[in-house]
């Protein structure tokens, strides 16, 4: 924290100067109040509660604290929770001029003593005022302290805010709104938020988000009422507008780019119109959730989520978009019944508008890290709530986005909720400007085991027989050569060795075959229905959606993308199917999963063909070691399955508003606690 200036220290320790400053502050508040034309919205709400004899907690943002004493007007005895640092002492002295008492502490620091005093005052029938983002932010992010106080006291939370047409927004942590005289002002009261006394952790978070979202919506509404918009929003319009103009100008070139991708097999010729927002599929009636998962990994991670929504909330429709042909083919046979698949439109203004005009989603859910400015901001502009799930950003991406704060900040702030894979990702998102951020675990840990065709499994097992076998899964360019070099080393001591290579992008099958055959290996390709014979060295699994088949066949799996600097892929897919896991040094995409496997002794890190060959030989030579690692891996993967329930709990307010859970459809697990009783769960 910045040390106070000598003048500030003198002011803090001088009783006379501090009293003078407080007198000036209260005089200024009264002057601003008398020289502005004020209106009040929802003024009957606190009156109604007081007439019922009900105390409540008054909630307002720290940056909009200045004029709150004037909206209270001594309606009832009021005690304001104020931090005990230097600024807090000055505020505490100033509010006494308005008949408001102070409680030293905060909902975040030194809270137990303050909480006891608050509960005592509320029990006596008085009201308590709290700034949920105090004492030091982040600004306009509510802490759970206010929810716990309301829960324990069994009183409602009543949000309130103000705005003035004339103001200075200071460059302080809370972006303090210094109201100016001779203009217009508005006070806005929100409906009471009732908090259930018995809440689990998910319920508390549910209520916290409701408070935060309601208060932010009220602040924006108050600003609009006096003809103002937030400073952040005004500053953040330049780069998005420039991006929109540039992408509109690039439309002819993007069309040519799409044709080139068609020629290379990276676009579906029959459905390329979807990339331009044109579709022949009708929008289903009723509420619709749009879920965007860019590629194979993201799509696989949300299959279980979509299945649960379909089962529990059959009135809600889902349209799922992906950006790659591989992801589309994966989803062809695995999408839950009734879910519609579309290719995501390219990030040009007109395709984006056509897509949103046609589908008119009631809720948009984005997965992981693919954020397109036109698509995100146009969705937000239309008032469609957006959630970001399983969010992650590499440090390299963070560095790039930090160079464009005027673009990434409005995009992240467009999301009502960001659920990050881990605490590191949550911190990165917050650093870039995301508001409501929480770490709930990786959805990939909650996926079901990959499926396999029993007939195909029996056929391949018969072809392999008793041969030693291992798998290099989801490989990228360069990793096939490493696997081939390892094969040549291992086969010297393990005659008859079969190496299975399953490339991440099967379209590379022909090129991989040429590389392997050039190194003297005999290759059988699954895409050509070529059988595994005694002479086969490498079985190239260049098909989509069959990875579960090859994990079941091998028992030893190298996780691709980890030796080629791609961040690795989901190791739990192998762990769930009785595989001992090997991976390279780069598992940034699934760091938490890799760490959990390593801590349990369920995986081994390799660095090149030599270390890979030694690791595979150890496992082939010692079946007990392989079984032990596989068992540990399976146990670690099973622990992560709770992530799906946690995510569903966190997004429940938005889903509840579209279609409630049908009791007959609920899983056998204990139902989650209901966080609030207010009708508008998305506020």
Image: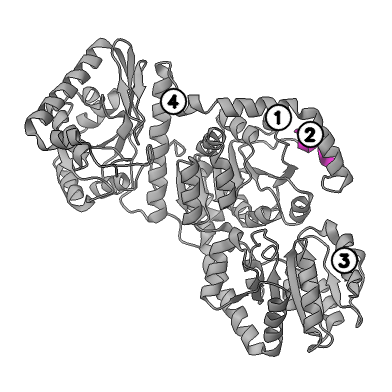
Q: Nearer the N terminus, badge 3 or badge 4?
A: 4
Q: Which residues are magenta?
A: 271-280
Q: Secondary structure at mark 3?
A: helix
Q: Nearer the N terminus, badge 3 or badge 1?
A: 1
What is the C-alpha distance between the residues marked 3 and 1? 39 Å
Q: Is residue 117 left or right of residue 452?
A: left
Q: Secondary structure at mark 1?
A: helix
- Provide residue 223's location: percent of width, then percent of height: 41, 22
Q: Which residue is mark 1?
A: 247
Q: Nearer the N terminus, badge 3 or badge 2?
A: 2
- Provide residue 278's location: percent of width, then percent of height: 78, 33
Q: Quadrant of residue 551?
A: bottom right
Q: Secondary structure at mark 4?
A: loop
Q: Nearer the viewer, mark 4 or mark 1?
A: 1
What is the C-alpha distance between the residues marked 3 and 4? 58 Å
Picture disc at residue 515: 3
Residue at image coords 53%, 44%:
655
Q: Looking at the magenta stretch, what is its main secondary structure?
A: helix
Q: Nearer the viewer, mark 3 or mark 2?
A: 3
- Provide residue 613's location: percent of width, then percent of height: 72, 80
Q: Nearer the N terminus, badge 2 or badge 1?
A: 1
């Amino acid at each position: 924290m910045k040390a106070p200036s000598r003048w500030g220290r003198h002011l803090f320790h001088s009783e006379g100067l501090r009293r003078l400053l407080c007198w000036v502050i209260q005089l200024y508040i009264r002057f601003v109040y008398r020289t502005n034309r004020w209106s009040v919205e929802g003024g009957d709400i606190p009156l109604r509660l007081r007439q019922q004899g009900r105390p409540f907690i008054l909630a307002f943002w720290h940056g909009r604290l200045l004029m709150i004493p004037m909206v209270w007007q001594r309606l009832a005895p009021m005690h304001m929770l104020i931090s005990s640092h230097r600024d807090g002492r000055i505020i505490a002295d100033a509010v006494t001029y308005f008949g408001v008492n102070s409680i030293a502490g905060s909902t975040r620091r030194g809270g137990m003593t303050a909480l006891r005093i608050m509960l005592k005052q509320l029990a006596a029938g008085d009201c308590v005022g709290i700034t949920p983002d105090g004492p030091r932010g982040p600004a306009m992010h509510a802490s759970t302290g206010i929810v716990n106080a309301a829960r324990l006291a069994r009183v409602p939370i009543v949000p309130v805010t103000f705005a003035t047409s004339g103001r200075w927004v200071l460059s302080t942590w809370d972006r303090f709104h210094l109201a100016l005289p001779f203009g217009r002002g508005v006070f806005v009261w929100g409906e009471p938020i009732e908090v259930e006394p018995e809440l689990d952790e998910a319920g508390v978070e549910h209520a916290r988000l409701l408070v935060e979202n309601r208060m932010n919506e009220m602040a924006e509404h108050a600003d609009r009422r006096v003809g103002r918009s937030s400073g952040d929003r005004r500053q953040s319009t330049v780069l998005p507008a420039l991006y929109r103009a540039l992408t509109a100008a690039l439309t002819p070139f993007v069309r040519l780019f799409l044709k080139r991708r068609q020629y290379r097999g990276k676009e579906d010729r029959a459905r390329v119109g979807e990339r331009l927002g044109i579709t022949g599929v009708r929008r289903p009636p009723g509420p619709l959730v749009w879920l965007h998962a860019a590629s194979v990994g993201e799509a696989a991670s949300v299959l279980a989520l979509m299945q649960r929504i379909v089962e529990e909330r059959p009135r809600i429709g889902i349209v799922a978009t992906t950006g790659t042909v591989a992801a589309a083919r994966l989803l062809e046979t695995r999408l839950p019944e009734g879910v519609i698949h579309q290719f995501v439109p390219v990030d040009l203004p007109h395709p984006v508008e056509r897509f949103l005009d046609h589908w008119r989603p009631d809720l948009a859910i984005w997965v992981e890290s693919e954020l397109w400015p036109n698509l995100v901001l146009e969705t937000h502009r239309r008032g469609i709530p957006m959630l970001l799930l399983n969010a992650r950003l590499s440090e390299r991406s963070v560095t790039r986005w930090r160079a464009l704060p005027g673009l990434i900040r409005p995009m992240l702030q467009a999301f009502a909720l960001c659920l990050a894979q881990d605490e590191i990702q949550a911190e990165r998102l917050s650093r870039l400007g995301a508001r409501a951020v929480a770490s709930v675990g990786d959805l990939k840990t909650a996926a079901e085991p990959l499926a396999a065709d029993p007939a195909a499994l029996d056929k391949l097992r018969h072809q392999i027989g008793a041969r030693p076998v291992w798998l290099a899964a989801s490989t990228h360019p360069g990793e096939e050569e490493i696997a081939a070099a390892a094969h040549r080393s291992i086969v010297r001591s393990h005659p008859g060795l079969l190496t299975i290579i399953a490339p991440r992008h099967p379209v590379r099958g022909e090129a991989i075959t040429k590389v392997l055959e050039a190194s003297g290996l005999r290759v059988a390709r699954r895409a050509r229905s070529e059988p595994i014979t005694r002479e086969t060295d490498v079985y190239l699994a260049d098909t989509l959606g069959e990875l579960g088949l090859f994990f079941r066949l091998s028992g030893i799996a190298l996780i691709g993308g980890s030796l080629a600097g791609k961040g690795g892929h989901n190791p739990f897919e192998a762990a769930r199917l009785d595989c001992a896991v090997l991976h390279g040094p780069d598992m940034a995409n699934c760091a938490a999963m890799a760490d959990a496997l390593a801590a349990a002794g369920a995986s081994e890190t390799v660095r090149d063909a030599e270390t890979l060959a030694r690791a595979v030989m150890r496992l082939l030579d010692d079946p007990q070691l392989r079984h032990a690692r596989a068992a540990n891996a399976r146990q670690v993967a099973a622990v992560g399955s709770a992530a799906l329930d946690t995510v569903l709990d966190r997004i429940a307010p938005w889903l509840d508003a579209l279609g409630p859970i049908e009791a007959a459809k609920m899983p056998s697990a204990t139902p989650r606690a209901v966080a609030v009783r207010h009708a508008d769960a998305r506020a």
